[in-house]
Amino acid sequence: MEKMQRRDFLLAAGALTAAGSTVLLGCQADSNSQAQKAPAGFTGKKIRWNMVTTWQAGFPVMGEGVDLFAQWIEEMSQGELSIKVYGAGELVPAMESFEAVSGGAAQMGHGAAYYWAGKVPAAQFFTCVPFGMNAQQMSAWIHHGGALPLWENLYADFNLVPMPMGNTGVQMGGWFNRKINSLSDLKGLKMRIPGLGGQVLSRAGGTAILSPGGEIYTNLERGVIDATEWIGPYHDYLMGFHKIAKYYYYPGWHEPGSVLELIINKRSWENLPGHLQAIVRGAAARVDQWMLSRFEAENRVYLAKIKEEKGVQILPFSPEILLELKRHTEEVLEDLAAKNPAAKTVYESFSKFRNEMTDWSRLSEQAYHSLPA
């Protein structure tokens, strides 16, 4: 009886606490100790939702994280809410996930906000900004800097509810089929790079191309593109980019901490009982931490593998190139804010928070990483 009371308390806490990811990390339901009586708030009604993603089914980290999200929700709700996950192309094409969830063809979606820049220009800020904030700073801005209400208001016009669910951490600068020694080497460069980073590259004289992950290898191999960014050593190695491009550049100036998003059809969300909304929020928060941790853990292993590959050169962008790209970034952001009132509001919030975070990070992270090795 004491064990049952304790387990019922934990289940109820999981249903009522949306931010309970810290407690829930690493906790798995014991299938052999199912309670005969569900805790208060559970109706027993079965709700079935569909979820579309911009990733291939089971894709490392992102796809795996989405599958865990569905699993954890079913466990915490004791089957009251179950989610069928569809990879890119299985129900709708990758880049149509936004419309599918907005229109109600699916109740949930997972991707990155900058994929919808053509429809919602201001959304790009909620993925990343070139030379912007890292993962933990983006999380601080979203949860404690006023960004989440701005994000929710922006998406409300599209019948969507957004929330963060994953982060890649600092990315690599990309794979190139030729050396980038000077600014002139960016002229005419065709590169797969989305979001604001793509606009910055265009200002520098290159051509930004947006394509789903499944098409990148073939496009790079066939010369449709000259370079590509993707994520970091783990995914880049699995994609096999080291076999067709020998120059691997850093740092990832374009994506210093890319937030991945969960989007939910607003009408479906409002009809979902409060305790299930809390479970969804808790599961999303748990996946948010799980993904970032997994990225960091795997990147350390696969960077070593890439270093062992013959012919691959890991090179830094020159200070001259980075300064020029940063200058173009400020131009792109100012232009976006001038043309789009919603983007201006988000940009002002982002800039204020980033400037304040810079003061703190100089005394904390930067100072720490400058310590003698």
Image (tube, rainbow, N blue to C red):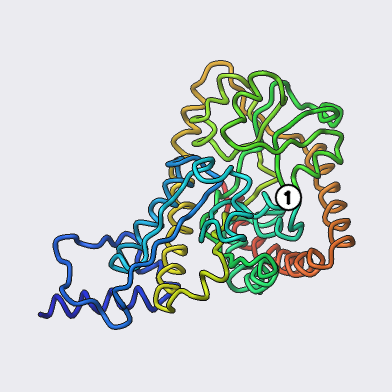
Residue situated in front as seen by the camera: 108 or 315: 108
368 shown above or below 311:
below
Residue 83 position by quadrant: bottom left
Indicate the position of residue 313 as horizontal and vertical percent values.
62, 23
Residue situated in front as seen by the camera: 66 or 345: 66
104 shown above or below 20:
above
Is any atom of residue 352 visible in this view? yes
Is any atom of residue 296 visible in this view? no
Residue 190 position by quadrant: top right
232 shown above or below 276:
above
Q: Quadrant of the N terminus?
A: bottom left
Left or right of 289? Residue 262 is right
Indicate the position of residue 94 as horizontal and vertical percent values.
58, 44
Q: Residue furthest left?
A: 1
Q: Residue furthest bottom?
A: 40
12 shown above or below 180:
below
Indicate the position of residue 309 as horizontal and vertical percent values.
51, 20
Residue on which disc 1 sits:
130
Residue situated in front as seen by the camera: 312 or 139: 139
Q: Residues within 10 Å of mark 1 (few under 14, many from 20)?
A: many
Residue 267 position by quadrant: bottom right
Indicate the position of residue 360 as horizontal and vertical percent values.
66, 66
Q: Residue at x 44, y 58 (%)?
A: 287
Q: Residue at x 87, y 34 (%)?
A: 205
Left or right of 322? Residue 75 is left
Q: Residue at x 84, y 57 (%)?
A: 336
| Number of marks in picture | 1
Q: Residue at x 48, y 54 (%)?
A: 51
Disc 1 residue type (three-letter): Pro
Q: Secondary structure at mark 1?
A: loop
